[in-house]
Image (cartoon, rainbow, N blue to C red):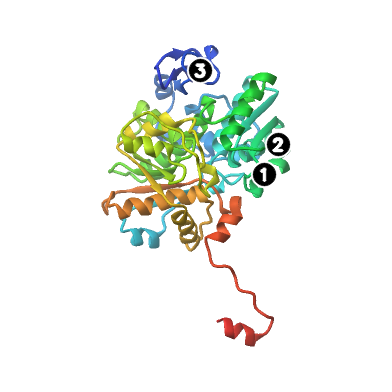
């Protein structure tokens, strides 16, 4: 079955056949949504059939993805997704919520949400017979691409700001990517990667540019639907809280829910909340101003994965909140660090971007945005080992003790 029907521009609404566009709208540069053959999918598949799948990865949703099966069984690329959903009772009681879920995408093969996009992009790159796949990244997207590409024996080039955490840069190099540390910001790396792709004919994976990235990220919405809404027989609309940088994750999650609504498999569209650090809040600023004009900022936050001057998927990210009855919330770096420590006490180790989402939930509760009975899910997007420096900042340093019982007693 040919699932991928057309592209549609998120700005002008113009529709393109698959061979008429590759990245953004040829008319105005707007981000492209991929439209599927929803009627054909409905005839061939059902929620019951999807739920009966024994595949425990994003590939259980292959009927809802615009790519063919990439093969590569037995590799990390086939282990992306189907990440755990926790229900920590102590946190729920602390926040006075009857139903709280935390979805931990730090459990993906390269320890971040970005594996979802990279695995689908690699599948697409194989279909178009790309020689080299290139991307810019603040760390996680590059690590995800490098890891998935290694599984597929695909050549990659990755541009990363030189200030990216060393753990993330180490992943890129270990996975065999050709890495360039850019003397500038993420946005500088983004622009250089686009120029390089154009000059050398490389296939670009960039978020907010390649439409297949959102298609990978939408699989989180499918899992939330299946794990929490469908199997949990949830009656009230779910509130989904997402950290936001360039906007592609929240846009992808929104796209996934829209696909499910289009198929008739989701009755109530979840309310989607975007959370941004105060120092990187271009989309939140637009939301609060009641406009779709997103004005770039000079990003300044310790949460490197969501530190973006100019969000390349800003419009769709904004609409993820405005079109679902959600909203945008900004939080301080200090609240981000506190969230790392708080979830650590529940046995969950997260990096600053993921902590941004949990800190956003705490802010929403303080603002009285949720009733006790409102179901809430927080999307945790990366493991704490991605940024050990931030993790150490979040907690008290361990004391040094002399190797004697007397010295230990003094410290105790």
Indicate which disc, 2 or 3, sits on the residue closer to the N terminus: 3
- Where in the figure is residue 233, as x and y percent of width and height? 33, 44
Q: Circle 1 is placed at which residue position?
A: 169
The quarter holding residue 50 reads top left
Can the viewer see residue 4 in this picture? yes
Residue 37 % position (x, y): 43, 19
Pointers 2 and 3 in contact (C-beta within 8 Å):
no
Please name which of the two marks, 1 or 3, marks the residue nearer to the observer: 1
Determine which residue is flagged by label 2: 179
Q: Quadrant of residue 137?
A: top right
The residue depicted at 52 percent of the width and 32 percent of the height is 216
Residue under circle 3?
2
Residue at position x 47%, y 13% in the image = 27
Figure quadrant of residue 274:
top left
Residue 269: in sight, yes or no?
Answer: no
Q: Are marks 2 and 1 in contact (CB under 8 Å)?
A: yes
């Amino acid at each position: 079955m040919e699932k991928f029907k057309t592209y549609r521009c998120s700005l002008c609404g113009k529709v393109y056949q698959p061979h008429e566009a590759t990245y953004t709208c040829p008319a105005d540069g707007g981000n492209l949504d991929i439209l599927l053959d929803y009627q054909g999918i409905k005839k061939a598949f059902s929620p019951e059939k999807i739920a009966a799948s024994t595949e425990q990865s994003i590939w259980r949703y292959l009927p809802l993805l615009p790519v063919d099966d990439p093969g590569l069984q037995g590799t990390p690329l086939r282990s992306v997704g189907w990440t755990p959903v926790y229900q920590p009772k102590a946190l729920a009681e602390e926040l006075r919520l009857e139903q709280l879920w935390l979805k931990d995408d730090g459990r993906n093969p390269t320890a971040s949400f970005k594996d979802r996009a990279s695995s689908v992009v690699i599948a697409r790159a194989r279909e178009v017979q790309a020689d080299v796949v290139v991307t810019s990244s603040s760390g996680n997207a590059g690590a995800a691409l490098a890891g998935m590409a290694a599984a597929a024996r695909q050549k990659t080039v990755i541009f990363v700001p030189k200030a990216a955490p060393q753990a993330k840069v180490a992943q890129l190099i270990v996975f065999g990517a050709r890495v360039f540390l850019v003397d500038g910001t993420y946005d500088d790396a983004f622009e250089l990667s686009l120029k390089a792709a154009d000059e050398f004919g490389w296939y670009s994976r960039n978020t907010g540019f390649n439409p297949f990235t959102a298609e990978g990220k939408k699989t989180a919405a499918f899992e939330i639907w299946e794990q929490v809404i469908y199997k949990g027989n949830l009656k009230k609309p779910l509130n989904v809280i997402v950290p936001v940088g360039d906007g592609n994750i929240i846009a992808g999650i929104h796209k996934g829910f829209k696909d499910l609504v289009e198929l008739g498999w989701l009755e109530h569209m979840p309310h989607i909340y975007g959370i941004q650090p105060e120092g990187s809040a271009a989309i939140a600023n637009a939301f609060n101003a009641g406009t779709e004009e997103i004005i770039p900022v000079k990003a300044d936050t310790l949460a490197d994965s969501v530190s973006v001057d100019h969000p390349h998927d800003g419009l769709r990210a904004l609409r993820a909140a405005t079109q679902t009855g959600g909203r945008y919330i900004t939080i301080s770096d200090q609240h981000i660090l506190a969230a790392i420590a708080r979830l650590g006490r529940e046995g969950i180790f997260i990096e600053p971007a993921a902590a941004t989402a949990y800190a956003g939930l705490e802010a929403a509760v303080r603002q009285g945005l949720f009733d006790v009975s409102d179901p809430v899910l927080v999307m945790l997007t990366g493991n704490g080992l991605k940024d050990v420096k931030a993790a150490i900042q979040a907690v008290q340093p361990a004391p040094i003790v002399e190797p004697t019982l007397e010295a230990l007693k003094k410290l105790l």
